[in-house]
Image (spheres, grey):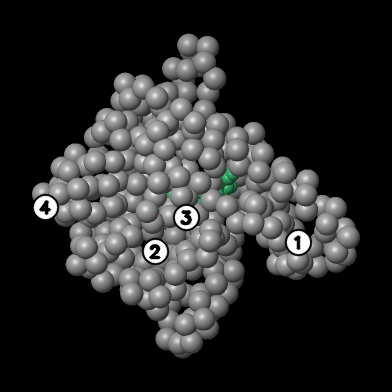
Amino acid sequence: IPVAQLTLDQAKKEIAPLRKQIAQWGKEYYEQDSPTVEDYVYDRQYQRLVQIEQRFPELQTPDSPTQQVGGEAESQLTKVQHEIPMLSMGDVFSIEELMDFNHRQQENRDVDVEPEYNLELKIDGLSLSLVYENGKLVQGSTRGNGNIGEDVTENVKTIKSVPRELPEPLSVEFRGECYMPKESFAKLNAQREADGQSIFANPRNAAAGSLRQLDPTVTAKRDLDTFMYYVPEYQKLGVTTQAEALDRMRELGFKVNPHNRVVHNRQEIEDYINEYTAKRDQLAYGIDGIVEKVNDLETEEALGNTVKVPRWEIAYKFPPEEQPTIIRDIEWTV
Ligand code: NAD
């Protein structure tokens, strides 16, 4: 039944098992690094839950998956409290939805000039926080449930692209994505298959499973890489835009994805999306969409966050890859 036609009673009946199913898939994906369904199946059910909660706000609960980030930290790893929460990200599945999001954002700010956006590739890995004190790497952690993550400092030190020391004595937290290149993922799975071990569902889960290891020597063998993309306390770097923050991170020796672009209007946004939808397969790493961020960091701060997602950024998600076009069209119009 389309959400618009649901009665309150029908919605009540549907919502509990729907939440339970989504929470179960979340646990498998975030905590066990072992999803049992494709992302587009998860996304579709998740969107339905969002729509039901929007239509019947009285059914909203704080423990709904729509109000929570990620999964719980692995019990055997040391826990880390994130002073600034590590959030999830809202998503849209078409240019129209993206434009609606931008218009709503403008309305909320009560301005009629289109802001500059910085577009970036959405790297398909897991979020990573790196804390430096006086220029030295002191902590690496995962997102976990957004407030409590896992300490993976020793594991992170085995990743070549993570600087142990910065050229300046900065005390700053940097955030980005830890991922496994496609080729390394294929090799790892081939090896695991040959050894009779279970294989990873995709590079994202292989990266998560490899970073969240109790033994750093296992992580060291896994060929993980990083792209850093965010500095929560940007003032500490003396930058005023997201594009400048990326440049500054490059200067400091981080690996930063080279494909970001500052854009000003719908045409430029569409061009970027089309370009990278076409180039996606040629990249050495997986991407599952495009991230649009307000470029001006003061505006970003003013827009702020909900309990789960920032209001200043949004993910445009690619349609699922393996589905034949006809099925894909049906999946995305329901
Ligand atoms: P998300 O992973 O879709 O988006 C948020 C994340 O994007 C951030 O935390 C960050 O790590 C990452 N990111 C990558 N590139 C970035 C960039 N350039 N700038 C900023 N952030 C960037 O959100 P989520 O809530 O963690 O997870 C939802 C996703 O996980 C969906 O794609 C969903 O399909 C999938 N999922 C799948 C299952 C399943 O069972 N298959 C279960 C749960 C979630």
Q: Give me the residue at 53% from left, 40% from top.
A: 72
Residue 47: x and y, percent? 67, 57
Q: Earlier in the sequence, mark 3 or mark 1?
A: 1
Q: Sequence-wise, which precedes: disc 2 or disc 3? A: 3
3D distance between C-alphas at marks 4 and 1: 51 Å
Secondary structure of the residue carrying tag 4 is: loop
- Could you say which quadrant of the image residue 84 lies in? bottom left
Tell us which disc is closer to us: 2 or 3: 3
Left or right: residue 72 versus residue 229 is: right
Of the numbered discs 3 and 4, the one sitting upstream in the chain is 3
Report the residue at 44% width, 73% height from top: 303
- Proximity of marks 3 and 4: CB atoms separated by less than 8 Å: no
- Position of the C terminus, as image quadrant, is bottom right
Residue 188, label in figure: none
Q: Which residue is mark 2?
A: 119
- Where residue 168 sits in the image (x, y, percent)? 11, 52
Q: Amino acid at mark 4?
A: Glu
Q: What residue is shown with label 1?
A: 59
Q: CA distance from mark 4 to mark 2?
A: 28 Å
Circle 3 sits on which residue? Answer: 87
What's the residue type where badge 2 is placed? Answer: Leu
